[in-house]
Image (cartoon, rainbow, N blue to C red):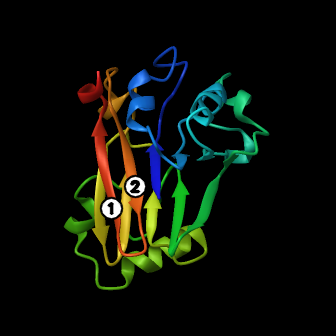
Amino acid sequence: MKIGILSDTRIPSVAAEVPQEVARAFEGVDMILHAGGIQATRVLDWLEKIAPVKAVGRIPGFQMESSSPYGLESMGDNRIAEQQVLQLDRYTIGMVNSLDLHSLNDDVMPGIIAAKNFPDGTIPSNVRSVFGTDVNIVIFGRTLEAMIEEHDGVLFVNPGSPTLPKNYMRLGQVAILHLSKETRQAEIIELSTLS
């Protein structure tokens, strides 16, 4: 199974539309997961022309993606939830926009989990407290920093942003997750290589 992953499209605030390079990167995917930063559901409509879509967003008090006028467009869309837990093949995937690992006390950024040197079992326990169940793969967004890391048996994937990587308005990244009975593998795709 091949899954396209993106986050923090933030359209129309930072771009008029999803970059066409995303469609090239997601060629042949079976499913697309959007890890939040959705301001307009037309982004999901566009993605659904490629493959079925599941999405998450921040829903404080059921107001999607903060109090911006664009966030209201996402309310009531059944493709979007505060978090998703998906069973795909033998893998349980947890997806959330803002990942809060309690023992970290910081945003999950590249290298920060390893730097904390947690005792064995701490990471799966923290992830279980977020999703209410054990997960093998965590997909998240919000930080605008692409990241693929494995810690204590949990694969963490943050695809960055196709439109606002590291908070710069330029062509960014998406991720592809390959699942088979034997392996799980994620890769970051730099969209500039597909221009």
**Does residue 117 appear anywhere in the picture?**
yes
The dot on residue 185 is 1
Please report whichever mark, 2 or 1, sits nearer to the chain's N-terminal start: 2
The dot on residue 177 is 2
Residue 100 in the image: above or below residue 143: below
The x, y position of residue 51, in whole percent, is 58, 41
Q: Secondary structure at mark 1?
A: strand
**Residue 144 location, quadrant:** top left
The dot on residue 38 is none
Identity of the residue drawn at 67% across and 38% down: 64
Identify which amino acid the numbered label 1 is placed on. Gln
Q: Do labels 2 and 1 touch, CB within 8 Å?
A: yes
The Cα–Cα distance between marks 2 and 1, rounded to whole angstroms, is 6 Å
Identity of the residue drawn at 53% across and 71% down: 89
Identity of the residue drawn at 38% across and 80% down: 122
The x, y position of residue 153, in whole percent, is 35, 77
**Residue 67 location, quadrant:** top right
70 or 67: nearer the eye? 70
Residue 90 in the image: above or below residue 15: below
49 or 103: nearer the eye? 49
Q: Secondary structure at mark 2?
A: strand
